[in-house]
Every structure is written in C-alpha cells, then in structure tokens.
Image (cartoon, rainbow, N blue to C red):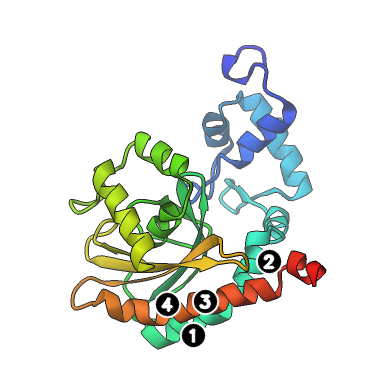
Amino acid sequence: MAGNSRDAGRSVTGRALSVLTAFDIEHTRLTLTAIARRAGIPLATAHRLVGELESWGAVQRAADGRYEIGLRLWEIGLLAPVHTALRAAALPLMQELCELTGENVHLAVRDRWEALYVEKLAAPRSVPIISRTGGRLPLHPTGVGRVLLAHAPARVVQEYCERGLTRHTPYTITEPGRLARELRAVRSRGFARTSEEMTLGNCSVAVPVRDGGGAVVAALGLVARSVRTEHSKLVKPLLPAAEAIGKRLAEHDPARSDAG
C-alpha cells in the first residue's frame, strides 16, 4: 500500500495470510497495532483485513479487546490429514502410554525446520514441559525432533545445520558433525534420546511412526525427569505403541483400500 514499502506488491491473499501468521504459540492474543507490526502491513490495511477475517470467523475479539484465532479457522484446521488420520490412529495408544508410564507423551511431525506437536498428553504427576499441542520446537534438541530429522532427506539435514544449531542448554548438541553421528545412531538403534538438551532436568526418548509403505510420518516420544530415568525403560513401551499406530494408519489408508 502507499506509504509502506513492506506492503508493496503483495497480493490481498498474501496480506490476509500475514495477518493470520502474526499469531503463534507465544502470541495468541494481539492488538490491532501488534498485528500490523508483526504482519508488516499498514495499520489501515490491518484494520480492514482483520474486520473481514472477523466477519468470516477466522479471528475473534476477546474480552480485553485483543484479537485471537477464531473457531471457524480452528474447525477447518481439524480437517487437515495430520489431524484426522494421524491423531485418530495415535490417541488411544497415547492414552495407554500416558497411563502406563505416568509421563508426558508427544506425537509430532516435521514441518520444514521444526517439530510440530500434533498431540500431547500429560499424566497428573508428570514433569512440567514447554511443549503444547499445536506448538513447535526445534528438531535437534528434542527427542521427537531428532527422530524426524534422522529420517529426513540428506539435503534437509544439511540445510538445517547450515541455518545454525541453537544452544538451548549447556548440553545441547550444536556441532553439525556430532549431530550427524547422533542421527546415524538414531537410525541404527531405532530410537532417539536426549538428556537436558531442551530443558534442564528433563530427558526424552522417541521412536518413528511409519505408514503402510514404511515411510516415517511422525515421531512418538516420552519426556521424563532426568534423575533416575533409564532410557531403555522408556523405549520399551514406545516401540509397540508406534508400531500399532502405524498399523492403524495402514488400515485407514484410502489408497490401500482402493488398491484392494
């Protein structure tokens, strides 16, 4: 729009999407001014677009006057395959894992450079963690993320390392060579393990979830306190649960049903 070079040449769709992506896990409620700033659009443009999105139900105004994502957008989001198929297949197994171990249970998929947490369950006395359903965390310091990175194409791993490996604790692996060795070990032993690499005091173990064709489509993990926790004991219930999720996915795969 005139007077703002950041907005020049952007389509109406692009500007509307920039309004929606101004929201994230750390910014769930925003003022109109904050939306304009984070979206990189003029305040007048933000006002018009937010009004249209509010009328449609994509955003809604909270009691404090700030805006948040609306129910209609949430409803449409639930139609994404990662929700309808993967979550439906995994949730019963995740509930069993949570009851059996008393720990946090995660299900995540890779979205470019991050682990997107599709589902998270926490037992009453499980260790506090920063992840949440719909949230994102980096790949290299998390158990589920490391599984997903280990089974990603080589070019993805290379580009991920070239972007820089952020150190989140003194124990985070930040050397590309060391991470590469760890990813090879993940593929070899069949699971990933981290110890206080994302959060001090916590450790994690994760295993791959494979579809009917054997491709890794998600990672299933547990997070527990580092003190007195044995990785092998966490892995033991994870492996059959991940295998069962994979079988459920294969049974509900439309392509396999059509082929039959």
Residue at the spot of label 1? 96
Residue 88 drawn above or below residue 159: below
Query: Marks 1 and 4: in contact by CB < 8 Å?
Result: no
Of mark 3 and mark 1, the one earlier in the sequence is 1
**What residue did someone put label 4 on?**
238
Q: Which residue corresponds to mark 3?
A: 243
Answer yes or no: is residue 23 visible: yes
Give the amino acid at mark 1: Glu
Q: Which of marks 2 and 4 is nearer the N terminus?
A: 2
Closer to the observer: label 2 or label 4? 4
Q: Position of residue 178 (x, y in %)?
A: 24, 48
Q: Position of residue 96 (x, y in %)?
A: 49, 85
Q: Residue 84 carries which label?
A: 2
Q: How crowded is mark 4: few (under 14 residues within 10 Å), some or many (20 or more)?
A: many
Q: In this view, does 155 lie to the left or right of 225?
A: right
Q: Nearer the viewer, residue 199 or 140?
A: 140
